[in-house]
Image: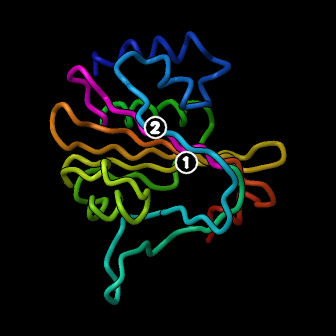
Amino acid sequence: MLRFASLLLLLCTFPGQAEDLRATLSAYSHAQLVESEQGAVVDYELGLDALQKRLGQWGFDKSVRVNGNRVASTYQIQDGFKASELADELEADVKARGYTVLFSCLGRDCGRAVQWANRVFQQRLLYGQENEQRYWIAFKEGESDVRVRLAYASFRTEARQYLHIEELDLTGLTPAEFVAP
């Protein structure tokens, strides 16, 4: 936890940008951006529980399908820092900024890591050890939209840890519709 004192300092240093998780992680020297994409999404599924196999198919028991703008970024966490601890710090930060966490899981409680990597995020490099994965999703009502932030941390080896974050701005959706899919 002491390792992330510099992250907390960065969060205080850039208060106007702190809601943008990418700005926070870009300023963090142990997080190297390896992939980023942005654009509009239509009927995009957001998981609100652990991935499970039901009737032969992997999926979420609780999820919501949304339309809006999405920015997704994947970072490799380096120099002995843990992606799951950084995900914890980011979750605490979004809570402090008024976001409501809808679901959070750690380790095997999240489901199969290979399914998160391939089915949910379509990024093979996120596949890692199931006992070291971490996921959370949170939302906040904006003036004319709902903002969603989520993070997924994976651990392949000590030197290959990844943190995937997504930031979505959803228009035409009320918080009640988002929370009760």
- Which percent across, then down, holds residue 122? 42, 58
Q: Give the quarter of the figure containing the C terminus.
A: bottom right
- Which percent across, then down, holds residue 52? 33, 73
Residue range of the region highlighted in magenta in the rendering: 70-83
Whether label 1 touches label 2, CB < 8 Å: yes
| Residue plotted at (61% across, 30% down) | 20
Dot 1 corresponds to which residue? 138
Dot 2 corresponds to which residue? 91
Left or right of 173 in this view: 2: left
What is the C-alpha distance between the residues marked 1 and 2?
Answer: 8 Å
Q: Name which residue type carries label 2.
A: Glu
| Element marked by disc 1 | strand
Left or right of 70 in this view: 36: left
Q: Give the quarter of the figure containing the N terminus.
A: top left
- Tell which circle, 1 or 2, labels the residue nearer the N-terminal end: 2
Please, is residue 123 above or below residue 54 in the view?
above
Left or right of 95 in this view: 125: left
- Which percent across, then down, holds residue 114? 27, 61
